[in-house]
Image: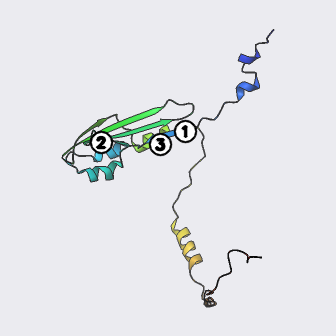
């Protein structure tokens, strides 16, 4: 006879779940980057804006594919794709998914763990003046020059012990 605890949430074995790592592959391309693309741009400029493509095929030399996938525990996998087409080494057109802005993408990455209020990373005028006073050189005693280093030895100890 079984007591039916195997399917129950009361069973401590059901409390433990294995850790699943995040899998990030490819190049994330933001909406802001896509907005910088203009037909007529040379390949080098497109690479500067979007980065190196994930897929550049020998058979499709005039096409670059930017693919981004993100698989995380307890969330749906995300997959975004952008394809860039060239003609005579100049951007002809591009097509793909509607890309999120950088802030939208970062908000999707929320791990549900709130770390509290983010501190301000700027100093007030009073804090700047106090820091300048602390870093000002002291006029009490002049710094002594460092002692000269001995020249390197011309002979080195043997790497192995002498033969017996």
Q: CA distance from mark 3 to mark 2?
A: 34 Å
Element class at badge 2: loop
Q: Which mark is residue 58?
A: 2
Element class at badge 1: loop
Residue at 29% across / 44% down in the picture? 35
- Tell which of 48 and 120 is nearer to you: 48
Tell me the quarter of the image containing the N terminus. top right
Q: 45 above or below 162?
A: above
Type of colouring: rainbow
Question: Dot 2: few (<14), some (14–19), or many (≥20) neighbours within 10 Å?
Answer: few
Q: Does residue 79 appear left or right of residue 139 in this picture?
A: left
Q: Position of residue 74 (x, y in %)?
A: 57, 30
Q: Position of residue 115 (x, y in %)?
A: 61, 46
Question: Dot 1: few (<14), some (14–19), or many (≥20) neighbours within 10 Å?
Answer: few
According to the picture, the residue beneath numbered tag 1 turns out to be 22
According to the picture, the residue beneath numbered tag 3 turns out to be 106
Residue at 23% across / 51% down in the picture? 42
Mark closer to the chain start, 3 or 2: 2
Tell me the quarter of the image containing the C terminus. bottom right
Residue at 22% across / 50% down in the picture? 41
Q: CA distance from mark 1 to mark 3?
A: 15 Å
């Amino acid at each position: 006879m079984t007591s039916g605890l195997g399917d129950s949430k009361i069973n401590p074995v059901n409390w433990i779940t294995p850790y699943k790592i995040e899998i990030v592959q490819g190049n994330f391309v933001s909406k802001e980057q896509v907005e910088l693309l203009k037909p007529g741009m040379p390949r080098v400029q497109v690479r500067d804006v979007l980065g190196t493509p994930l897929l550049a095929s020998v058979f499709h030399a005039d096409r670059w594919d930017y693919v981004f996938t993100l698989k995380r525990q307890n969330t749906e996998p995300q997959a975004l794709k952008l394809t860039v087409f060239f003609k005579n080494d100049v951007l002809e057109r591009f097509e793909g998914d509607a890309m999120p802005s950088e802030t939208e993408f970062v908000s999707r990455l929320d791990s549900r763990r709130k770390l509290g209020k983010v501190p301000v990373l700027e100093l007030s005028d009073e804090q700047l003046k106090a820091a300048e006073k602390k870093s000002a050189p002291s006029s009490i005693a002049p710094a002594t020059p460092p002692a000269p280093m001995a020249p390197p030895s011309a002979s080195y100890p043997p790497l192995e012990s002498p033969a017996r």
